[in-house]
Amino acid sequence: MDENDPGLFAVHNSTAESHAKASAPPLVSPTGPSRSSNVQCDNAPLAVRMRPRTLDEVMGQQHLLKPGSPLRRLIEGGGANSVILFGPPGTGKTTLASLISGATGREFVELSALSAGVKDVRQVIDDARTRLIRGINTVLFIDEVHRFSRTQQEALLAAVENRVVLLVAATTENPSFSVVSPLLSRSLVLQLESLSPADVRGVLERAVTDSRGFGGALTVEEEAYADLIRLSGGDARRALTYLEAAADARMDAAAPLTVADIERSTPDALARYDRNGDQHYDIISAFIKSVRGSDPDAALHYLARMISAGEDPRFIARRLMILAAEDIGLADPTALQTAVAAAQAVQMIGMPEGRIILAEATVQLATAPKSNACYTAIDAALADVKKGNIGPVPPHLRDGHYEGAKKLGNAIGYQYPHHTAEGILAQQYPPDNLVGRDYYHPTEHGAEKRIASWLPKLRAVVRGKPKRER
């Protein structure tokens, strides 16, 4: 299905009153419920029924809701900046958008990136211009804005810049990767954080006691609370979903909810990971930094998360090869060999057996002595080249395998090292302006310690005054 074909989509466009009739929770104001008399359907999921109706009910995100902050001003009816709410699932993005919509004098229009095309976007903007003439501002809420195509996002630019609409966009993906730069520059990017254990506990307790939830008819054992908090991963929606499932799974409806009820009803917690989003980059970054930091246990944890999420094992193996050269180098010359072998083996064998090979390579690289001397050496050499410190190649090192080369003085006086017993002799190799410049500084780690001891002697011999024929 082509997501950019307007004929395949429908737009949900409503006033504050009609919006309350939709399947989403009723609209809210910063101080209390909406004027709408509609109530949420009793058979709606617990997570939907318990969506905060007022700012006071919001758990977490206090760093964004301080007095005078842009987000709080929007919710309280002031402020005119469009915002992109970026954060993990279940942290309140849709709730905050709903709170913003409840401010007086605003029309609320919701578009889903899964069900709206460019035609729908343009229609919303045209309608907003008409309302603006009557003094009514339009709040345009776009859920999962990262799924909008570039064309759909660019269709919003003029309306957002001219404040024809107040855009409130929600995304679980880092906007730097998923939202076009012009739209980013016209909006405030507000990052929501996963809820703390205390915040999740508050969400659960409210659901247990509030009339929208269990109304006090359910009791929860302390260990069960702890289990639900752990499984939630800071996601309020997930916590409420697991609570509801566990409550339904009780053998005795009058009995307290226990850990056994949760285990009976709840599937294994899935690692939050999107191969195409910022979690992809965050997890691989943590993996590499754990290996570099010589923590094999943390490295195996992140490796397991990537494998469980279906990450391409070849991608993991490629990163291990880079790390072996960049962070281990000659401190353990076998590290790169191991990484290359692991990449080849994973390519030949595939998964799930490939996980064992990746784990072996990960543990060896994590526990290997570390040195970035080769990495810093090539970067230092490149920096000199970029500065123009190149100089002509010494004549005795130039190619002499063509007619007329010797007439130019090329290759005359070159001394072949293997003609000496030691295989080393004094001879100038760098250009004149770089004689004596050191790029490689070996560490005292692992096998590089031997190089660190030998290299000064080697340089002393090679940099002796060579006798060259002219």
Image (cartoon, rainbow, N blue to C red):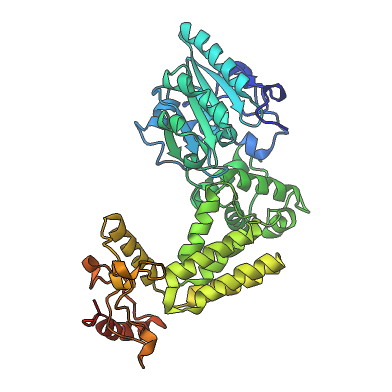
Q: Residue 32: image x %, image y %?
A: 51, 25
The structure residue drawn at horizontal position 46% and vertical position 16%, both measured from the top left corner, is 164
The structure residue drawn at horizontal position 43% and vertical position 30%, both measured from the top left corner, is 187
Q: Residue 373: image x %, image y %?
A: 36, 71
Picture quadrant of residue 33: top right
Looking at the rendered image, the quarter that the C terminus falls into is bottom left
Q: Residue 5: image x %, image y %?
A: 68, 25
Query: Taking the image as drawn, is residue 231 in sight?
Result: yes
Residue sitting farthest toward the right:
251
Q: Is residue 10 above or below residue 42?
A: above
Q: Is residue 23 above or below residue 419?
A: above
Q: Is residue 308 above or below residue 442?
A: above
The structure residue drawn at horizontal position 49% and vertical position 36%, both measured from the top left corner, is 85
In the drawing, does residue 77 fall left or right of residue 424?
A: right
Picture quadrant of residue 36: top right
**355 or 302, nearer to the observer:** 355
Q: Residue 218: image x %, image y %?
A: 67, 46
In the drawing, does residue 470 fall left or right of residue 422?
A: left
The structure residue drawn at horizontal position 33% and vertical position 73%, both measured from the top left corner, is 411
Residue sitting farthest toward the bottom:
421
Picture quadrant of residue 400: bottom left
**188 or 75, nearer to the observer:** 188
Residue sitting farthest toward the top:
134
In the drawing, does residue 329 fall left or right of residue 109?
A: left
**12 or 395, nearer to the observer:** 395
